[in-house]
Amino acid sequence: MAAEPETMPQREDVHVCALSQIPGALSVVRRRVRGVLAEWELCPEVAEDALLVISELTTNAIVHADGPASLRICWTDVDGRSALHIEVTDSGPSARPCMPGGSTDPDEHGRGLGIVGALSTRHGIRSDRAGFTRWADLVTA
């Protein structure tokens, strides 16, 4: 009988949280996810990158979309390596101005997806009738 090929152990961990569009929501999400990533024993360097990616994707949903929105983190496989999968789903663009307080300073805004691209192994966006999901994968091993 032939030996079965080695397979990557599957992690069943999934964390989902609703995102509210109130002041301070991002800091609450960051604290909550920092605890989850520590529970999952993610190395500190990858955890910090993941928190930055989560901050950028979450901020985009809070600032640019109408509610509801949600964050989901789980494990996936990228080319045979374990990766943290991050996704933020929102209902799509809002009719309100994009910049709080009317600010349009390019030094203050517009770099988020570049940061996501620099820190992730792969990233993207998908849409359906319910809205948009922006996602990123960070290889951990």
Image (tube, rainbow, N blue to C red):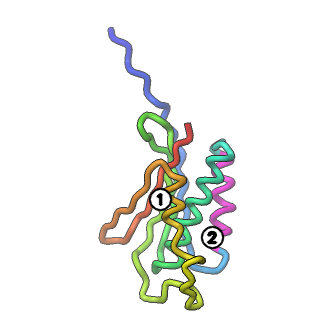
Mark 1 or mark 2: name the one nearer the start of the chain: 2
Q: Residue at x 69, y 46 (%)?
A: 44
**Amino acid at pointer 1:** Glu
Q: Position of residue 54 (x, y in %)?
A: 56, 61
Q: With 36 as the anchor, is 71 left or right in this view? A: left
Q: Position of residue 32 (x, y in %)?
A: 66, 60
How many numbered dots are placed on residues in this image? 2
- Which residue is at the far top? 1
Q: Residue at x 30, y 71 (%)?
A: 129
Q: Position of residue 110 (x, y in %)?
A: 51, 73
Label ID, residue 16? none
Point out the image quarter for the C terminus: top right
Magenta: main secondary structure = helix
Determine if the magenta segment contains residue 30: yes
Name the residue beneath numbered marker 2.
26
Name the residue beneath numbered marker 1.
87
Q: Dot 1 lies on which element?
A: strand
Viewer-nearest residue: 15 or 117:
117
Work out whether 90 lies above or below 96: above
Which stretch is magenta? 25-39
Q: With 66 as the anchor, is 105 left or right in this view? A: right
Point out the image quarter for the N terminus: top left
Viewer-nearest residue: 137 or 103:
103
Work out whether 12 lies above or below 125: above
Few, some or many residues within 10 Å of mark 2 (<14, 14–19, 20+): some
Discs 1, 2 touching: Cβ within 8 Å: no
Give residue 104's quadrant in the image. Answer: bottom right
